[in-house]
Image: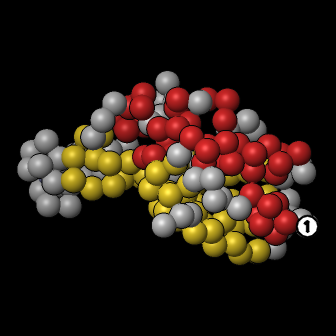
């Protein structure tokens, strides 16, 4: 299963929702075509399950093309797979801004696991951890913060 792209125009903002595996089948031209007349692009990326190396290149091509057209780009609730790529390739973002990340958390008290949305900034996983739905304790990031967040 390749990536599914949902495209919705709202005023001067193009909303993109990406779902699945971002790979070489990612259709950049479909999106740049749909972006004509928009001034902003808002990408919802919580359901991007994985990104292949060719997917990274396609995503970079998309970001550069949107930038070149003068669009402001915002990424919201980026998945762990996306956050991981961005931390490995900091230049990938360019002028695009990441608002938040949806990352895996685990409860040290009871072992429950859950996804939590935190601001995309250094230290956010420790400063804004979700509460455990099962026992109410503060959860901890399941992994190293530097794998997912700016530092
Ligand atoms: Zn718990």
Question: Quick check: 19 above or below 116?
Answer: below
Residue at screen point 67% across, 38% down: 93
Q: Kindly state the secondary structure of the residue where label 1 is placed.
A: loop
User: Mark 1 near ligand 1 (CB under 8 Å)?
Assistant: no
Count of labels in the image: 1
* 70 to 125, vertically: above or below: below
Q: Residue at x 20, y 61 (%)?
A: 133
At 30% across and 35% down in the image, what residue appears? 143
Query: Please, which colouring scheme is shown?
Result: secondary structure
Percent of width and height locating residue 134: 14, 61
Residue 92 drawn above or below residue 19: above
Residue under label 1: 37
Q: Looking at the picture, tell me which residue is in the foreground, 102 or 124.
A: 102
Residue 66 visible in the picture: yes
Task: Place residue 124 in its image quadrant.
Answer: top left
Q: Quadrant of residue 29?
A: bottom right
Residue 10 is left or right of residue 110, and the answer is right
Q: Residues within 10 Å of mark 1 (few under 14, many from 20)?
A: some
Q: Residue furthest left?
A: 110
Q: Is residue 118 visible?
A: no
For image coordinates 66% across by 35% down, the residue present is: 92
Q: Horizontal and vertical percent for residue 121?
A: 51, 35
Q: Using the image as rendered, state which of residue 20 and residue 97 is in the foreground.
A: 20
Q: Is residue 78 above or below residue 25?
A: above
User: In the shown orientation, is residue 6 left or right of residue 150?
Assistant: right
Residue 69: image location, x then y, percent: 90, 51
Q: Position of residue 31 (x, y in %)?
A: 76, 63
Q: Report whether 104 appears left or right of 149.
A: left
């Amino acid at each position: 299963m390749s990536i599914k792209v949902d495209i919705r125009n709202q005023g001067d903002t193009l909303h993109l929702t990406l779902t699945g595996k971002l790979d070489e089948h990612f259709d950049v031209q479909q999106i740049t075509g749909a972006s004509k007349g928009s001034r902003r692009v808002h990408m919802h990326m919580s359901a991007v399950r994985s990104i292949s190396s060719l997917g990274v290149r396609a995503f970079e091509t998309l970001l550069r093309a949107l930038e070149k057209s003068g669009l402001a780009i915002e990424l919201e609730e980026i998945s762990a797979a996306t956050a991981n790529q961005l931390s490995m390739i900091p230049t990938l973002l360019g002028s695009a801004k990441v608002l938040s990340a949806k990352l895996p958390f685990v409860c040290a008290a009871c072992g429950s696991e859950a996804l939590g949305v935190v601001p995309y900034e250094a230290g956010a996983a420790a400063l804004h951890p979700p509460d455990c739905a099962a026992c109410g304790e503060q959860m901890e990031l399941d992994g190293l913060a530097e794998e997912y967040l700016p530092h």
